[in-house]
Amino acid sequence: MRHYEAVVIGGGPAGMMGSITLGGKDVKTLLLDENDVLGGQLVKQTHKFFGDHAHYASVRGFEIAQKLQEEMAKDPNIKVETSATVIGVYPNNLIVYAKDGKEFKVTYKKLLIATGAMEKQLPFINSDLPGVYGAGAVQTLMNEYGVMPGKRFLIVGSGNIGLILAYQLIQAGAEVRGIVEALGKIGGYEVHAKKIKRLGVPILLNHTIVKAIGDESVSGAVIAKIDEHFKPIPGTEEEKVVDTICVSVGLTPLSELAEQAGCKIEYIPQLGGYVPIRNERMQTSNPDVFIAGDLSSIEEATTAMIEGKIAALEMAHNLKSTDVENEINDEIQTLSLFRSGPKSEKIRIGLEKFGINVKPVPEIERHGVQIGPQGKLRAIIDCTEEIPCNSCEAVCPFGAIHIGENLNSTPVVDYDKCNGCATCVIACPGLAIHMLKEDVENSTALVGIPYELLPLPEKGQKMWALDEDGNYICDAIVKKIAKYPNKTNIIYVEVPLEFSQKVLSVEFPKRESPFVCRCEEVTLDEIERVIDSGITDFEEIKRLTRVTMGPCGGKNCKLVVLGILSRKTGVPISKLSHGTSRPPVKPVEFSLFTKRDDSK
Amino acid sequence: MEGRIKAHPILEFRRGKRVKFYFEDREIEAYEGETVAAALQANGIRVLRYTPHTNRPAGLFCAVGKCSSCLMEIDNVPNVRSCMTKVKEGMHVRRQNKRGDVL
């Protein structure tokens, strides 16, 4: 049996940061994680994280995991065991885990439990049907394994995970038919919601899923409006044609191991469910056991990392009497800052039940959206909800963006200093910043839109400009595609001046047009375009589009094409030339002609 | 293989070596490093077992080893979490019926 000064269970953001901090304080540490790669849920997050630059703001989740892995690998004080499933924590500081089909035992002086959380269940009819996944499962499949488990999705729950999932699904090429949210308001960050709304994803408030449809696998979903008691209102049921349903109705802490380790557990709904009681320094009712991350309260990776650090510092102090007082106080202060915004109200209420009060922090400043001086190329920031992030302020090379001491404050731009460099556009984790320059003389405007989808358009290409709800407003011509290493690119499009303040998104023109010629697969749209270009002769339309020239010889489509031509030109069909009919009138074997016997 | 993301605006998928395993004796192509459950989803296979009491089909739910919805019979061992088990060349995977047989 091996013995360690410190053991950490769980290699997500909290456990990794805890291990790094312990190692840095010369504590011999063992980190146990069930997965074969460290990082926890970070490894499947493709979006840039909110926060400040000391805590990896603007860095994508999977890249944060890589950075933490690299840091850990450098420290000889940290021993990592992956694919190690902890099965129980026993008296006398004993941990038993399974790895490669064998059982291992290890003891600790101090234990940090960072087991995280799991997704909550939502029972509805057929919620056990294959094709109903937890939102996190779909993230794992898509972003870890490159597997797309469906084509058309319905998401249940509009918290950050549901909103992020919708965006990630679109990035991976799937269709999101909608998000249903039982409450009357969106649960997650406004910027995450806006990102998907302008891509056309409807978020249906006061709605729930009633049942999944399907025998062996999902082939649809019934949703309905709900009343104030969350009961479906009869007659409002609506069927959605989807093949996959993702449930994201929140997370609940995984507190079993903490309970086995002798930590007192309490049910605190604001923190996510059953959580271990702990003090401000993450120490539980068992003085040898500490917790951090989602196990202590369902929050963000940023706060999980800070908690991991606080727990580890206090553990190092307990073990080696290391002086960590200033460091701990700094971290507690930072945590208070992160939790001072309105989105953290639940967490604050929950923590108060443990007698933990958030420290006083500088007041939050609030600013609306500024439009800035017309005619100048500049950044427009649509970020009016108080969330803990100051990435735009941190990256601006000209000091033109101010957020101030409390990072929940909303940004304010000094347009005398903004020089249109767009650095903030590509850094903003919420994709809430775009570029704008009006050209009054030519009645046009240049709009620069952050774009994280494939394929990229080409310069000169015509796209559709969309508003905040993903509705078409006007055509847009692509003027420039600015590519950036962090893969948030900017597409600059020219639009009519009158729409300059409405354009927030672009998409490729949707060519949904019925097929007229089923042999040669020619659409109504293609035929109309040829006619619109001035070609009104049936024979010429044939040669250009190949309508009527397939195996059926025009039996299917000839009359339809002539009808279109007649409608467009005003010439009655009877007056139009309908071309020449040539043999063969039915598809026959070619050998019929080559083996012809003229004597018969 | 169907069900796989070919191009992604943010991620590059560095897939492992191609391997073959068997699902109900049917040959399935997969990549080294991915889990049995992921490989099956990529191949459009969603029903991973039938439940003990009501014989209902069950599939993958959490994909991170927590919910136990994806239990399968892998190389004759029942109750294996297919979302936490990596594919191996020649592996035999079967849908689990009820609780699985004790060997």
Image (tube, coloured by chain):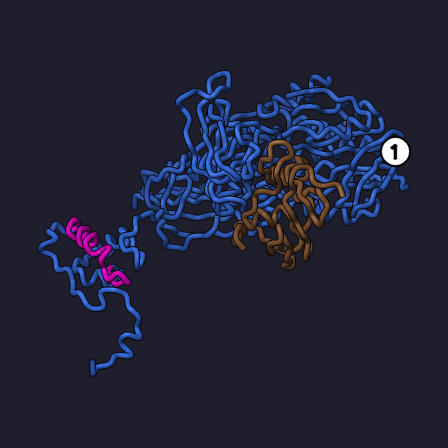
Chain colours: A blue, B brown
Badge 1 crowding class, 10 Å Cα cut-off, few under 14, some 14 to 19, many 20 or more, is some
Q: Amino acid at mark 1?
A: Lys
Residue furthest toward the left? A575
Q: Is residue A398 magenta?
A: no
- Residue A505 to residue A264: above or below: below
Q: Chain of mark 1?
A: A
Give coordinates of residue B20: x percent, y percent.
63, 57
**Along the horizontal axis of the image, is B3 left or right of A309?**
left
Q: Quadrant of residue A378?
A: top left
Give coordinates of residue A307: x percent, y percent.
72, 31
Q: Which residue is mark 1?
A: A109
Judging depth in this view, the residue of A57 and A117 nearest the camera is A117
Q: Which residue does the image show at 89% across and 30% down from the upper left?
A: A92
Judging depth in this view, the residue of A76 and A80 nearest the camera is A80
Q: Is residue A552 magenta?
A: yes
Give coordinates of residue A438: x percent, y percent.
36, 42
Q: Quadrant of residue A17?
A: top right
Give coordinates of residue A434: x percent, y percent.
46, 41
Residue A138 seen in this snapshot: yes
Q: Which residues are magenta?
A: A548-568
Judging depth in this view, the residue of A114 and A92 nearest the camera is A92
Residue A189 seen in this snapshot: no
Q: Which residue does the image show at 42% across and 32% down from the upper left?
A: A239
- State the quadrant of the C terminus of chain B: top right
